[in-house]
Image: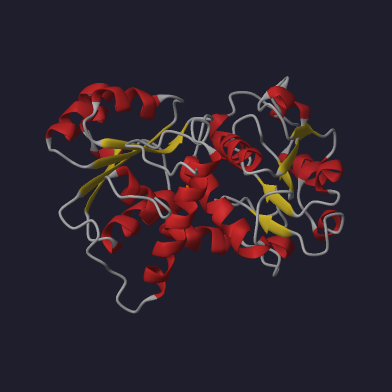
């Protein structure tokens, strides 16, 4: 029998079963239509409180968690590091304990250090949701990517997925590799040698191929996922210039021709146009970048609902 998602915290995809992932995606499908209504509000989380605690910049994730909370009638509070007492020297754990003392139901956290959500989950009474921790995981991004793929391909099992770019610094790549391989996709990655971790082919037990060239990864792919160059996480030169990166690793229409004729293009955002992806590709009908953002709200509604005690679809 399938086991649904029933967890207090969402810390990553790695610890979830395929059934739990499908349970979250099916729950998100149920919430999706609320976002298309004229009055985008239901009372599902009335009386619940969600705190968005972001120590790194964000446009998509923070806004969509806030919208998700508000559309479910939860009270949402946003805290950024520049306006919090962390700037006065308070420790992360003390900040979390103080926020927890105000009895929120859920704390959504983004931090530049891997493992911060896991650390907070040990001291907090509220459910902790990982909105991105360093280069470790970005579980809701992988879930919204999966929702986008399911919507346009009807399935994930058996698909060939190319993930291209700055793999080394990418939490999006790691969460997606866990999710896609758990659901039966075959994943290939490619990027400059300096931006692909050594021994990455062993990152998951099966289904991951490290390709020497971007063309090898894209060849015959059903899904091409392009990653942002994460300049903020680079403390040395990983490639000579952005122009050279774009020449050798940028997704152009010419390179996309190698993929299947019905291949779709994903990018988590924010995009560096003309570097990892050409504007022609980013703005083409094969690009589902704004669909990803749209489904992000439904996924985060599902995650907040489940993290605060809701039952998954199928449960
Ligand atoms: N994809 C993503 O995490 O975007 P933001 O950094 O804008 O949240």
Q: In the image, residue 194 lies at what x, y percent?
A: 73, 26
Q: Is residue 147 visible?
A: yes
Please state if 268 lies on the left or on the right of 184 as rendered: left
Front residue of 20/165: it is 20
Q: Is residue 97 left or right of residue 296?
A: left
Image point 31% across, 51% down: which residue? 305
* Residue 256 x/y as whole percent: 81, 56
Direction front: furthest residue: 1
Relative vertical location of residue 17 with respect to residue 157 in this rendering, above or below: above
Which residue appears at 76% of the width and 55% of the height? 222
- Which of 13 and 91 lies nearest the eye of the viewer? 13
Q: Quadrant of residue 5?
A: top left
In the image, is residue 302 above or below residue 123? Answer: below
Q: Quadrant of residue 55?
A: top left
Vertical arrangement, residue 204 with respect to residue 302, above or below:
above
The color scheme shown is secondary structure
The total of numbered circles placed on residues is 0
Q: State the residue lying farthest toward the bottom.
A: 38
| Location of residue 190 in the rendering, given as x and y in whole percent from the top left corner | 77, 37
Q: Is residue 81 visible?
A: no
Q: Position of residue 57 (x, y in %)?
A: 42, 43
Q: Residue at x 22, y 64 (%)?
A: 43
């Amino acid at each position: 029998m399938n086991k649904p998602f029933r967890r207090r915290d969402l810390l990553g995809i790695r610890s979830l079963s395929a059934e739990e992932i499908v349970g979250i995606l099916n729950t998100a499908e149920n919430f999706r239509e609320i976002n298309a209504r004229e009055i985008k509000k239901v009372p599902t989380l009335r009386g619940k409180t969600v705190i968005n605690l972001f120590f790194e910049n964000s446009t998509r994730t923070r806004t969509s968690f806030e919208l998700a909370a508000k559309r479910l009638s939860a009270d949402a509070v946003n805290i950024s590091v520049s306006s919090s007492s962390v700037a006065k020297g308070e420790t992360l754990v003390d900040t979390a304990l103080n926020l927890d003392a105000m009895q929120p139901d859920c704390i959504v956290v983004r931090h530049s250090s891997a493992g911060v959500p896991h650390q907070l989950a040990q001291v907090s009474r509220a459910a902790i949701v990982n909105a991105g921790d360093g280069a470790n995981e970005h579980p809701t991004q992988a879930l919204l990517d999966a929702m986008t793929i399911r919507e346009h391909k009807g399935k994930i099992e058996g698909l060939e997925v190319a993930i291209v770019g700055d793999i080394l610094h990418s939490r999006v790549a790691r969460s997606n590799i866990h999710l896609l391989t758990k659901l039966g996709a075959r994943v290939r990655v490619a990027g400059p040698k300096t931006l692909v971790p050594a021994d990455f082919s062993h990152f998951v037990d099966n289904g991951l191929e490290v390709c020497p060239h971007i063309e090898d990864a894209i060849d015959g792919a059903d899904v091409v996922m392009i990653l942002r160059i994460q300049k903020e996480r680079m403390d040395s030169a990983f490639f000579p210039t952005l122009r050279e990166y774009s020449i050798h690793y940028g997704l152009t229409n010419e390179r996309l021709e190698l993929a299947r004729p019905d291949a779709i293009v994903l990018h988590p955002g924010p995009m560096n146009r003309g570097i990892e992806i050409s504007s022609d590709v980013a703005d083409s009908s094969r690009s589902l970048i704004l669909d990803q953002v749209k489904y992000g709200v439904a996924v985060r509604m599902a995650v907040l609902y489940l993290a605060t005690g809701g039952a998954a679809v199928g449960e």
